């Protein structure tokens, strides 16, 4: 059964971002707590993730993957929607919420028209955080609280993307 690609197109648009490539921007005011869009794409297992993407051969990590659980990852590059262009920020205005294996993006605060939608990727690796990893997974959000990486830092290990 195909999942419905939940989104409200009149709320958002994709355009160039100062943070990274393309981004998603509010077209009209979005209220705190409002569900904005579902993160969709092909659902694949860890073996398929490894087959498609070799993080260690990339100079800089770049995928449209969203891990749902240890068995399922959504690849937004295949059958995805605008949600795949939502960029990372260490000071986000949105959050990703798992609702029974479906991932929805919600507003953490009121978002005005023209403002870029951002959530904290909290990308988690099963290896110690090194300078080389920080370089491969950089953050360019520009927030005063920026940790310099999209990776989970050790004190945040219980949270994950």
Image: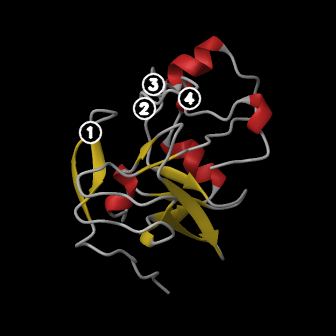
Q: Which mark is residue 145?
A: 4
Mark 2, residue position: 141
Q: Position of residue 76 (x, y in %)?
A: 42, 57
Mark 3, residue position: 60
Residue located 34% across and 33% down the image: 19
Residue located 47% across and 66% down the image: 32
* Contact, mark 3 vs mark 2 (Cβ under 8 Å): no
> Position of 52 compared to 11: left or right?
right
* Contact, mark 3 vs mark 1 (Cβ under 8 Å): no
Q: Earlier in the sequence, mark 3 or mark 4?
A: 3
Q: Position of residue 110 (x, y in %)?
A: 42, 61
Q: Is residue 62 visible?
A: yes
Q: CA distance from mark 2 to mark 4?
A: 9 Å
Mark 1, residue position: 17
Placement of 4 over or under 17, stated as above or below: below
Residue at disc 2, secondary structure: loop
* Contact, mark 3 vs mark 4 (Cβ under 8 Å): no
Depth check, front residue: 151 or 119:
119
Depth check, front residue: 112 or 101:
112
Q: Earlier in the sequence, mark 1 or mark 4?
A: 1
Front label number (3 vs 2)? 2
Q: CA distance from mark 3 to mark 4?
A: 22 Å
Depth check, front residue: 113 or 76:
113
- Classify residue 128 by image quadrant: top right
Colouring of the image:
secondary structure
Q: CA distance from mark 2 to mark 1?
A: 10 Å
Judge the density around disc 3: few (<14), some (14-19), many (≥20) Cα neighbours within 10 Å: some
């Amino acid at each position: 059964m195909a999942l419905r690609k939940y989104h409200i197109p009149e709320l958002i648009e994709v355009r160039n971002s100062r943070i990274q490539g393309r981004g998603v921007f509010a077209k009209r005011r979005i209220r705190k707590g409002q569900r904005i869009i579902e993160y969709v794409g092909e659902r694949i297992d860890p073996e398929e993730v490894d087959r498609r993407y070799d993080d260690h051969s990339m100079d800089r990590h770049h995928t449209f993957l969203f891990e749902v659980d240890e068995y399922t990852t959504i690849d937004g590059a295949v059958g995805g929607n605008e949600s795949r262009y939502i960029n990372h920020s260490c000071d986000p205005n949105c959050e990703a919420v798992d609702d029974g294996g479906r991932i929805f993006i919600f507003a953490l605060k009121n978002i005005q028209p023209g403002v870029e939608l951002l959530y904290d990727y909290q990308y988690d690796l099963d290896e110690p955080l090194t300078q080389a990893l920080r370089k491969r997974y950089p953050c360019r959000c520009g927030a005063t609280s920026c940790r310099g990486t999209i990776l989970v830092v050790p004190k945040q290990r219980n949270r994950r993307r």
